[in-house]
Amino acid sequence: MRTGTLLAVAAALASTVSGAAAQSYDLVLAGGRVMDPESGLNAVRHVGIRGGTIEIISVSPLEGEIVVDVSGLVVGPGFIDLHAHGQDLFSSQLQARDGVTTALELEGGTGDVKEWYASREGQAVIHYGATASHGAARRLALGSREEAVRLAADLEQVEVMENRLRDELARGALGIGYGIQYTPGARREEIHRMFQLAAVEGVTNFVHIRYAGLVEPGSSIEAVHEMIANAASTGAGVHIVHIGSSGLGQVPTLLSMIEGAQARGLDVTTEVYPYTAASTDIRAAIFDPGWRERFGSDYGDIEWDATGERLTEETFNERRETGGRIIAHIIPQEMFEFALAHPIVMVASDGVPFVDGNGHPRGAGTFARVLGRYVREEGLLTLMDALRKMTLMPAQRLEAYVPQMAARGRIRVGADADITVFDPTAVIDNATFEAPTQPSSGIEHVIVGGTFVVRDAELVEDAFPGQAIRRR
């Protein structure tokens, strides 16, 4: 058992004192089933919160200015989403109703860290943060969006990227974010140089890998090889996003590779979202000629997001010219279930912003879907394992260089009061591809920094306690 875990258990035990009721707290969550993935605590307790911090976890009742009876409900750490593109207010409110207390834009990142953080200050429902965008640094170096996608960079242009990313990391960016499959012009040497920079700066690379496909060369296996090789040769950490949609039919092999890399001391991790469909723009390089062979899919597997229309060769080519968001039904059910059940895989939504009520339902229902469908109904994983994938593991992915995260993802004395209270018998996602903005059910209370943002399953209007999550 790690030293941090022993200290957390000792603190929890020390706080359980008979005289606890003599003190008063700002907020008491009374009589809930407290579940903490770090210590393994899974028992009825009373949680006392003061000043945005968990101050006591008691076997005895507590007094407080506000006392909320949560008997019959699970009191767990607030869910941490490492992969949330939907950073607008509407998307964040839907995530809060799905139990999320921290939502980070780590794959895509931002091209201007200072402006990005400043635009959210005082206006955030949940905690927020972003990486520095490799794609944006490419646009700066190569001069235009199209050139940044297709052209290879020379060494001087690579140096421009390095300097930009170094500056953005100094402004608090949470690492470097890449969409390599969206920028096929980025050669392996360029990506290796970025990993070297990340190693020097002590941050993690959050990567959409180079290929998603079944055909060699250019398979998902080849793309993960590149990530593991870069991690091994530079010492930098890498988090591979959405292993289900990037791995397709090769998920078991990819997870075996990642697990083997971890066993040999490499800092390689991954995540999955619990759906069989991906979402992106139809103009993306992902859909360059040959995509049907690479994915093992066809035109009818592609849905036009705005209308729900399934495409044909003719309509695909028409939409490819004009652009727009699609839903790609290309992920085998058994593959994402294999990933979800695997002990090394975290849960993250990859939720995109909702536009005119359209979008992928993962932005509204990922976490309740895991708890309702895959824990309660399917028994694919235990409740504690699911919570660990949603809370502790994401916090640990960042905490080595983002100290704020060491106080999140846990229910223990001294932890930040980011807490999700849900009914394990009723929690479920309601968002569908036809109605993607339907909020989840069974998420009864969501507390961010000691402040309710969801209470009695209703959004609390004008509650904006979300804080910036930044690199040290």
Image: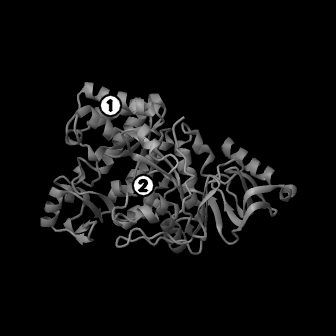
What residue is shown with label 2?
A: 88
Q: Give the structural element (helix, strand or loop) at label 1.
A: helix
Given the current orientation, which residue lies at the most extreme left position? 314
The quadrant the C terminus occupies is: top right
Residue 38, position in %: x, y? 64, 52
Image x and y of residue 330, in percent: 30, 63
Give whichever of discs 2 and 1 has the lower sequence position.
2
Q: Is residue 234 above or below residue 466?
A: above
Q: Position of residue 246 (x, y in %)?
A: 34, 54
User: Which is more toward the observer, 248 or 317?
Assistant: 317
Looking at this rendering, what residue extends furthest in the top direction?
A: 156
**Can residue 303 be seen in this snapshot?**
yes
Give the residue at mark 1: 161
Residue 220 lies, in percent from the top left, at: 31, 50
Q: How many labels, in total?
A: 2
Query: Is residue 217 shown left or right of residue 109?
Result: left
Three-letter code for the amino acid on which mark 1 is drawn: Met
User: In the displayed structure, would residue 98 be above or below residue 394?
Assistant: below
Label 2 amino acid? Asp
Mark 2: give few (<14), some (14-19) or many (20+) Cα within 10 Å: some
Task: Identify the residue at the far front of this view.
Answer: 462
Give the left or right position of residue 447, taking residue 227 as reference: right
Please identify the quarter of the rendering in which residue 311 is found: bottom left
Apparent side of residue 122 relative to residue 279 in the rendered image (left or right): right
Residue at 42% x, 36% y: name it.
Answer: 231
The residue at the point 52 percent across, 61 percent down is: 96
Q: Nearer the viewer, mark 2 or mark 1?
A: 2
